Image (cartoon, rainbow, N blue to C red):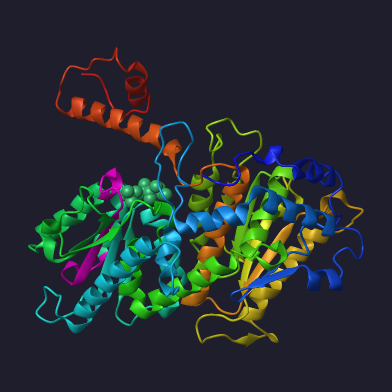
């Protein structure tokens, strides 16, 4: 579905943007980043300011980007998505054919939600969670005669790990007293072993998160941890909760203390505000904090409906990304949070963006005629400054950057040292990097020359609290889907991860054959047998 059935290159404004891109705004000319420009190039919503005077755009480019948003019908498609249009599909070919309704988890705060059915299901699951958490708090739900669970292990991978984990780490300053959360995602046995070594199983609740209920890593880790319970003489059923798609193979109440559901219209990488994130965050931060995350996300979902790009930070961020990627030919984008709490947020965005928009066919199943999703990566500042910023400033590749910062720190602890606080040092560095990348520096010595014109923007809010985190999450989710709409790709499937999964199973079959001492028929899959042998993982005889 979608108002836009053409790709980017077929939109009328495409040629205009190509022409403008021949002479993009020069940030290195003295006075180019003028005070009036800094003040004017600012879009605000839900407590976030997006400062973009250090992007290579001027009013002509911004007007053309506005036309790009209008001609592609990006916001209308965003609204159609929220109402329940079947956006996850490829026209004329077999595809998932699903609605895309992660926003429904947040629309519960609307008097009339966009999609009544999905928001009702979200509400029912929230009530289910609220009762469960109350039972845990009162000690009613406990295998320990009134003593409470203190620890929680989240077992899940990909969308069932990255978003929820990024949120928990971002908000661990608000963690409830005597509650700790741990994560196991990798099928590497050391991931589970390291956690099992340091927790008291008898006081631990284990949330197994898998929408499909079939993911190799998650099912393996579930058995791995259940085995530890068995070894400890404990009944794992009293400790394990399931968070899964309704009707999935994991949707089996007999095996779990409690079950929570998510639905097929919520994609894994968009699922942090469904039960996928809710159960763990509710345990670790409390139910009210989780609702604050939802409130913040909902507020940004609404802000993303604004059609004027200068008043819509997610849409503007999406368009600036397209300007840099499709017109200025920058292949990657760095997300650089100046906040230690956002340690894993770039990793979440990497998945959310690259799995959504790393596509080569349009929604009509034709090859795309333009570049789609960029490579997304990043690390918190100021740490990154002492690592990879050399390349950002003087490398041969131009990397547009999205800086994220907060005016206040989370903990009530900061100190003035040599005249400034640590928080001031942090934010001063953020601003300095943005300016340095943009304006550069002339020098006689070529090795000390900074070319400048390296575009970036700043997203800044007051303080990283649950509401703000929810808004930030939704801002990026909206940015990613809006870009997908403009590129006319399906941002909601992930066929590209299938082939590797199938081949991994073939290698596992080889291990089984080897272990059972069966005859090895190398004629069917000569290359996989040869690879095992070359890697020293298997010897004949
Ligand atoms: C996300 C992807 C993928 C998924 C994991 C885990 O959009 O679909 O990362 O989240 O593969 O899947 P399950 O939740 O089904 O175990």
Identified at 12% across, 82% down, the residue is: 146
Where residue 287 appears, as percent x and y from the top left, is 34, 77
Task: From the viewer's side, name the closer residue of 354 and 305.
Answer: 305
Task: From the viewer's side, name the closer residue of 59 and 97.
Answer: 97
Q: Determine whether 413 is above or below 76 in the image.
A: below
Viewed as shown, does residue 255 lie left or right of 170?
Answer: left
User: In the image, which residues are magenta?
Assistant: 198-218
Q: Looking at this view, name the residue that lies furthest to the left.
A: 233
Identified at 50% across, 73% down, the residue is: 296
Q: Is residue 482 visible?
A: yes
Q: Is residue 286 visible?
A: no
Identified at 7% across, 62% down, the residue is: 233
Identified at 43% across, 37% down, the residue is: 495
Q: In the figure, residue 539 lies in which quadrant? A: top left
The quarter of the picture where the C terminus appears is top left
Where residue 413 appears, as percent x and y from the top left, is 52, 86
Q: Determine whether 107 is above or below 245 in the image.
A: below
124 within the magenta span = no
Q: Determine whether 151 is above or below 67 in the image.
A: below
Q: Looking at this view, name the residue that lies furthest to the top.
A: 523
Where residue 6 appears, as percent x and y from the top left, is 63, 38
Task: From the viewer's side, name the closer residue of 92 and 259.
Answer: 92
Q: In the figure, residue 130 lies in which quadrant? A: bottom left
Where residue 344 appears, as percent x and y from the top left, is 48, 61
Q: Determine whether 14 is above or below 121 in the image.
A: above
């Amino acid at each position: 579905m979608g108002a836009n059935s053409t790709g980017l290159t077929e939109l009328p404004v495409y040629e205009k943007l190509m022409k403008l891109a021949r002479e993009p705004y020069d940030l290195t000319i003295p006075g180019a980043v003028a005070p009036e420009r800094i003040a004017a190039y600012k879009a605000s919503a839900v407590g976030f300011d997006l400062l973009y005077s250090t992007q290579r755009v001027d009013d002509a480019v911004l007007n053309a980007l506005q036309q790009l948003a209008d001609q592609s019908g990006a916001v209308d498609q965003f609204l159609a998505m929220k109402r329940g249009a079947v956006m996850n599909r490829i026209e004329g070919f077999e595809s998932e054919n699903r609605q895309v309704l992660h926003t429904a988890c947040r629309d519960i705060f609307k008097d009339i939600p966009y999609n009544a059915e999905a928001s009702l299901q979200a509400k029912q699951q929230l009530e289910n969670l609220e009762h469960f958490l109350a039972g845990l708090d009162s000690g009613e739900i406990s295998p320990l005669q009134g003593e409470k669970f203190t620890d929680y292990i989240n077992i899940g991978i990909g969308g069932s790990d990255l978003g929820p984990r990024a949120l928990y780490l971002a908000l661990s300053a608000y963690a409830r007293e005597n509650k700790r959360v741990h994560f196991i995602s990798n099928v590497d046995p050391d991931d589970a072993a390291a956690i099992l070594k340091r927790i008291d199983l008898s006081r631990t609740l284990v949330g197994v998160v898998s929408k499909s209920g079939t993911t190799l890593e998650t099912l393996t880790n579930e058995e791995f941890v259940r085995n530890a319970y068995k070894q400890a003489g404990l009944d794992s059923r009293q400790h394990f909760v399931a968070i899964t798609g309704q009707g999935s193979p994991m949707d089996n109440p007999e095996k779990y203390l409690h079950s929570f559901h998510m639905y097929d219209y919520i994609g894994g990488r968009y699922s942090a505000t469904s039960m996928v994130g809710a159960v763990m965050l509710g345990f670790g931060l409390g139910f009210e904090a989780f609702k604050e995350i939802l409130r913040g996300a909902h507020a940004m979902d609404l802000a993303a409906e604004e059609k004027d790009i200068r008043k819509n930070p997610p849409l503007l961020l999406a368009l600036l990304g397209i300007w840099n990627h499709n017109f200025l030919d920058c292949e990657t984008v760095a997300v650089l949070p100046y906040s230690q709490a956002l340690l894993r947020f770039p990793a979440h965005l990497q998945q959310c963006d690259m799995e959504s928009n790393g596509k080569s066919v349009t929604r009509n199943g034709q090859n795309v005629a333009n570049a789609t999703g960029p490579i997304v990566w990043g690390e918190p500042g100021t740490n990154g400054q002492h690592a990879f910023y050399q390349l950002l400033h003087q490398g041969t590749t131009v990397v547009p950057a999205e800086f994220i910062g907060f005016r206040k720190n989370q903990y009530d602890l900061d100190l003035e040292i040599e005249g400034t606080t640590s928080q001031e040092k942090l934010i001063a560095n953020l601003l300095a990097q943005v300016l340095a990348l943009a304006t550069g520096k002339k020098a006689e010595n070529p090795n000390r020359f900074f070319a400048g014109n390296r575009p970036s923007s700043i997203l800044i809010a007051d303080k990283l609290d649950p509401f703000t985190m929810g808004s930030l999450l939704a801002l990026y989710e909206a940015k990613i889907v809006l870009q997908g709409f403009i590129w006319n790709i399906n941002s909601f499937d992930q066929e590209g991860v299938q082939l590797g999964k199938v081949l991994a199973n073939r290698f596992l079959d080889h291990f089984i054959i080897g272990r059972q001492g069966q005859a090895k028929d190398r004629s069917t899959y000569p290359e996989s047998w040869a690879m095992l042998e070359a890697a020293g993982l298997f010897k004949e005889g």
